[in-house]
Every structure is written in C-alpha cells, then in structure tokens.
Image (tube, rainbow, N blue to C red):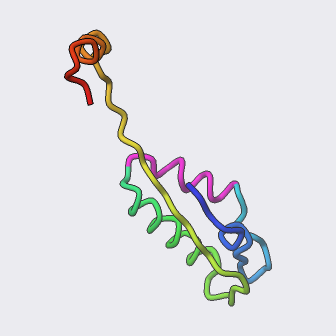
Amino acid sequence: MVYTDGVLDAVNTEQEQFGEERLRETVRTSLSLSASEICRRIALRMDAFSAGSPQWDDVTLVVVKVKSEVADLSTVGKELQEGHGD
C-alpha cells in the first residue's frame, strides 16, 4: 500500500487526525477483500471519520495485492535444465 500524507492528516470536526493506527486497523480488518475493495473501505472510513470537515490536503491511495503461487521447485528446476522454462 502506498499513500500520501493526506490520508493520515484527514481531520474530523474535533481536528483529530485519521492517523496511522486507524489506517492500519482498517487494512487489518480488510485483508480478505480485493485491493479495490480495501481502497473503497479506507475511503468510506475516512469520510465517516471526517464527517464533512473540509480537508486541506490531497489524498492518494494505492493498494496492490500479490497472489502467492507455490511452485514445485523440483519441477521448475527440471524444466530449466531441459530448456523448457520461461
């Protein structure tokens, strides 16, 4: 995940910042979702937190999920030796 400081610096009506802990908690509870759904959930949580307070900073957020693949290394090694690997 990559984000600008506008995510952390978003404020509510009490001038409290959204902050890193709220961001981490939102991500932690969203790990089973897709990357776009995680972004959407963070944006919704920020909107609810700020409750209409004007924001002074831009907000940029990028979430990328990487699918892990478990390869059979013995097969991969054999394919590379035979010249069949990519």
Between residues 73 and 77, which one lies in front from this camera angle? 77
Residue at 55% of width from left, 56% of height from top? 26
Would you place residue 36 above or below residue 55 in this image? above
Q: How far across and how far down the image is residue 83, in percent?
A: 23, 19
Give, as a single range, the part of the protein colored magenta.
Answer: 21-32
The residue furthest right is 15
Would you place residue 31 above or below residue 84 in this image? below
Q: How far across and how far down the image is residue 79, in percent?
A: 23, 17
**Residue 86 is drawn in which quadrant?**
top left
The quadrant the N terminus occupies is bottom right
Residue at 69% of width from left, 73% of height from top? 6
Between residues 65 and 22, which one lies in front from this camera angle? 65
Residue at 39% of width from left, 62% of height from top? 37
Does residue 15 appear to the left or right of 58 in the view shown? right
Residue at 66% of width from left, 68% of height from top? 4
Does residue 42 appear to the left or right of 33 in the view shown? right
Between residues 5 and 19, which one lies in front from this camera angle? 5
Q: How far across and how far down the image is residue 74, in percent?
A: 28, 9
